[in-house]
Amino acid sequence: MNARLKIIVPIGVTIGVAAIAFLWRGNVEPSRWFTLEGPRAMYVAIVAAMAALLYYYLFRARRGDEIYIRRIAGVDAIEESVGRSTEMGRPVLYVTGVEDITNIQTIASLLVLGQVAEMTAEYDTELKVANFYPITMVVAEEIVKQGYTNAGRPDAHKPQNVMFISSEQFAFAAGVNGIILRDQPATNIYIGRFFAESLILAETGYLTKAIQIAGTAEITQLPFFIAACDYTLIGEEMYAVSAYMTRESRLLAMLKSTDVIKAFVIALLLAGAVFATYNHLAGSHEPWDLGGWLVGK
Amino acid sequence: MAAEQKDWLQKLQTFDRRWIFLAMGVAIIAPLFAPLNLPVAPSAMVKSAYYTVEDLKEGDRVLLSLDMDPASTPELEPYYRAVLLQLKRKKVKIVIATTWYAAPPLVERWLSSTVEGRIIKQGDSSYHGIPDDPYVKNEDYVWLGFREGREATINGMATDIRGTFDNQAADGTPLDDIEIMNGIESLADFDLIVMVSAGYPGIKEYIQQAQGRGNLRMVGACTAVSVPEYTPYYNSGQLLGLVGGMSKAAEYEKLVGKIGTATQGTDVLNLGHVVVISAILFGNFIFFAGQRRRRTLRSGKV
Amino acid sequence: MKSTIPLVIGCFVGWFAFGELYVPHEDYRWVFEFLRDQAQILAAMAFILGGINVIQVNYPKIRRREADWQYKVVLLVGAVAMGTAGLRWHALGGEADSGSMAVSGTAAVGTGYATLAFDSADRDALVIIDGAPPVRAWHSGNPSDITKPPGDQALSVQLRPGEHVITVRKPVEGYAKHEVSILVADNEPTSAKYEILKRWVELLPAAAAVLPINVAPGQVVTVSTDLVMYWGAGSPHGRVFTWMYDHIFFPCNATMFALLAFFIASAAFRAFRARNTESALLLGAAILVMIGLVPIGRAMSPIFPEIEEWIMDTLNTTGRRAIMMGAALGAIATGLRVILGIERSHLGSD
Amino acid sequence: MGHLSAIDLFGYWLGIFLTFAILSFLYKDNPVYKIAEHLFIGVSIGYVVTLQYFDVIKPKLVENLAEGNLRYLIGLALALMLFVKAVSKRWSWLGRYPIGFVVGFYAGLQINGVQADLTKQMEPAMSSVVVDKVNVNADPAEALQLLPGMNPSIAKRIVEVRAEKPFASIDEIDEIPGLPQWQLDDLEEARGAFNGLDAQASVSSGDTFWFGTFAKLLMLMGLIASLVYFYFSVEHKGAIGKVSRFGVWVLMIGFGAAFGYTVQGRLALAIGRALDVLGRDKDPALAAQIDGGVVAVISIVVIVGGIVAWELLLRRRRESDTNK
């Protein structure tokens, strides 16, 4: 595929879908079976563009095109810290957050867990997984097992190392604290959705001199993780980690497509602000209210 | 000399964080026994809340919605006590309800001690205002109890409060027999709505479900974490006053003239913030002292 | 095959759940809600697996007497005790003192009425006479008098001639209530004739009828009872369950939460160091906001609360916005990966 | 209150003891803390399982099945497949059905959940960068009440006053007749040429609120820069590197602010705990019976004694080990 096409296709897809959504708004009569009222047109546009881009990049990645992804500091840290755990002969602790599988952050965390499990299997290091909900535990167990299988060591997988602690926030914190203090893991990885217990875990982990890596999109807890952990994956980085770790085509495709949409969002923000400022300065008449269109006004 | 200097810096660098725990512990406990009573200056939102209640007349009817659980009492109970004293000394009739299932045991305990009893104990020298008198159940106040349904309950209260509570108070007395409920069909019939809200459902849901149906007068208290979420409602005039968190409750206590746990707690907040800020500054002092040492050592070597 | 069908199921229900926003039809909603119920049931049933897991993890440690095995016993006992208390076996609270009633006629306390006295270990009980607002058992009869020191007096209320229903219950839920009907005879000031027809404890609310006892004016009726705790959960909440919640779970939970006040200080000490521009900004903003938020800052200068508000309104909002937007995109992509069937690591490979 | 029954009194004491047992963790991990911790975790597990049964399994599964809604067997079947996983290795693949179901369902649902985050956050960022001063002589009360020091009643009063005689200058704002003194004080306090009333309000239309404009511009650039930081496809060098660095700064200031903001709430919880132990939040008569202060001191003595004994024991054991 030539270089020009590589740029034109994603931009074309995004703008095309956005244009369709823009023209569609208000033109689809809401019926009992389908409605695009309010902001729904925009939602469909984003999902459609993202899906199209996913398949496009998947296609390109499978053809063997190289896809560039910048370094994410926390990712290298995960690999290093697993190595360090191996040297010290101490386990790795992975905490999947305090939300149920209903939350996408938990799902993202479980996907990262797969890579970490593969890594620990290769290094032959014990991996302990602490879960807040039993259903998360069940899925985590399956994922860890798969990780060990991928690494070619299914026999090394110990199901009882994937634990359910408690579904009460601070009892969970106390339980994980117990693991941190008594099993002395050399690496603590906290990825997923966290609330007030974040600092309890991270400060206890500091006591045991473990390397701590955290990742969450929970804004109120990020400052605590940033303060108390060695590396913190901020917001979207958490979703990007698994892609960077494996460099698998499906994950790289995901990163690429979010980036294209993000670029589009930035452009839209700028355009919206410029239009709004222009409208403001020129008086009250409003030829383009992009912001209002987004939320379906 | 140099060796001696090295000693104090090294000591600091291996500083045990437990000393900070101790400092924090003292900061939390000490003011409870020896209140500092640091200055409290009421802010605009709190004053607005206070004077909105002050505008009520004797015999006016107020809905007091206690949407909270035991975990949020430190932040919310002081406001509840202060506003209740204010209402009682104005001899305002109070209708109390809740939309939180965890609230009734707590509220019933409060009712017997604060509503049916006196908030100002006889011989209380710290208070100089008008004392409050005990309220009589179903004459001066009504306890409607709890109904499940979150915002649906609030919506129900906004349209038909009698139906929402099955036409009876929590003790089974028919609402028709209670004089102060006369003419009250919905939230709009109250002279004021006072919300003590720890989260969802709470102030936001009241405003969304009820405010739109008529220009209701509402004031509320919330936890410190919710302040950014609710401030826009004050700015837009939907909420006539907002008391957010313990420090604002202390300001309210000051306005009401009865010093309570919030004022004590705010001493702690002041000290606690000072401890945290000192910890940051102290940590940085050690850090920079260490860096300078390293730099001088390095330049000494070269 | 072993993972393809689950994958297809996942994609199908995933798209179905996605469509919920776009299809207002009630049939669609019905199916959607049904599926959501199933997912919730699944998550709840998984708690049984969670319980098994807790035993699987802890029991071997106890059996092998590994380090700290004693504590694992505490853990399991706590879990089993709380779980059992949660079952709704009301009567298992034990047949405690069923309560009694004694009438003494010697003291002519007054004429025209009998006196109700109360005597019980459960002095924090409420006494409800004829459905009137409850009086506290320790009360002297003056409802405003709440600071009266404990143990000072017993309840003493005048009962006019006629039939009265006296109910004794705890101010907290989860106890049996004790109910009796008292018939105060008319105008027999000196008669010492009385009869206790039945003493009786009601274990379940609204059970059998209340049987009356006769009391003559001038006599004192003493109600004495130890109220039995309900066992179990649910409504009315079992008291054993709530007791464990109130006195074990709640204080521990709140104290774990309170530890944060200490950890915040130590994290501030060791981590908030101006190593570079980023951390300097972090700690600078934290200090400014902290000063602005407490009264002491306001007392120092009104500029601090203003700076605090400004930072919260502008820069904090901006950072929040960026993270929410980025995270939303990441989340959409991750979700799509699952429902497009691109992601399958949670389903195994064979 | 009257006498607490022995069991409740003991309960309060136990609560106070457990409080200090957990606080002893601040010193170090020790047996007393471990007992409290394990008891707490155990009780919490019993608690959540009970709640799950009464909140979900009973109303949704048991009652539906009892009523003959056989379609709920699907949930039961899925759950049983999950259990197979726990007991049989050979059939454990059956567990993938419920996992596929539940992960797929919530992934689909969450896409809709986060969409609103994206668009709702974009909209306010796409407003005009230039911010005008509010005209107290013309703008509606809704706009006036957003000004510093204002509230709805002042705004209403201003609308009344200006109908009679328009304001000639902003200086008249804290002399509006008919307002209570405290509101006038607030208005005077809110004056300020930078970001206060003087900067934000004027008596004519079209004046620019410069600091607000600056803040708006800063927010827009900050937002875009922060988004660039999350851009993974290019290396963060050169101009892009600088922009993304600026984005990180904005994020860091936001985090610092969030940290400072949360401190108050966390401290309030610790205060709440202290008030509870000391009985300050309780009825005085009840508090007098529990006598929390004394119980606290006794608890501390017992716990400290326990920890000292434990440390001595450890030391002796260590010494005897080295002697061997």
Image: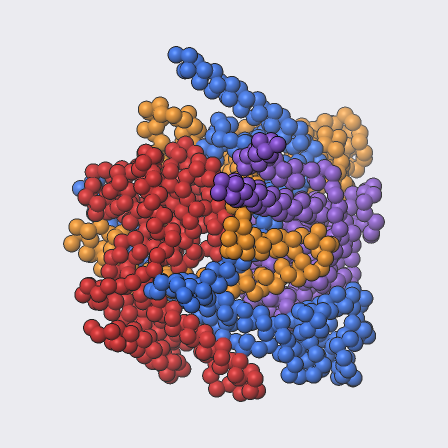
Chain colours: A red, B purple, C orange, D blue
- Front-lying residue, A91 or D139: A91
Residue B205 sits in quarter: bottom right
The reply, left or right, for residue D245 in relation to residue B51 is left
Residue D37 can be seen in this image: yes
Residue C20 can be seen in this image: no
Residue B54 is situated, as x and y percent measured from the top left of the image, at: 76, 61
* Residue at (64% x, 66% y) in the render: B234
Residue at the front extreme? B302
C244, above or below B210, in the image: above
* Residue at (47% x, 60% y) in the render: D248
* Residue at (58% x, 61% y) in the render: C312
Residue at the top extreme? D324
A73, above or below D280, in the image: below
- Front-lying residue, D184 or D51: D184
- Front-lying residue, B136 or A89: A89
* Residue at (57% x, 25% y) in the render: D304
D132, above or below D3, in the image: below
Q: How many marks?
A: 0
The reply, left or right, for residue A35 in relation to residue A2 is right
Residue D207 sits in quarter: bottom right
Residue B219 is situated, as x and y percent measured from the top left of the image, at: 66, 62
The reply, left or right, for residue D90 in relation to residue B54 is left
Q: Quadrant of the N terminus of chain B?
A: top right
Residue B259 is situated, as x and y percent measured from the top left of the image, at: 75, 47
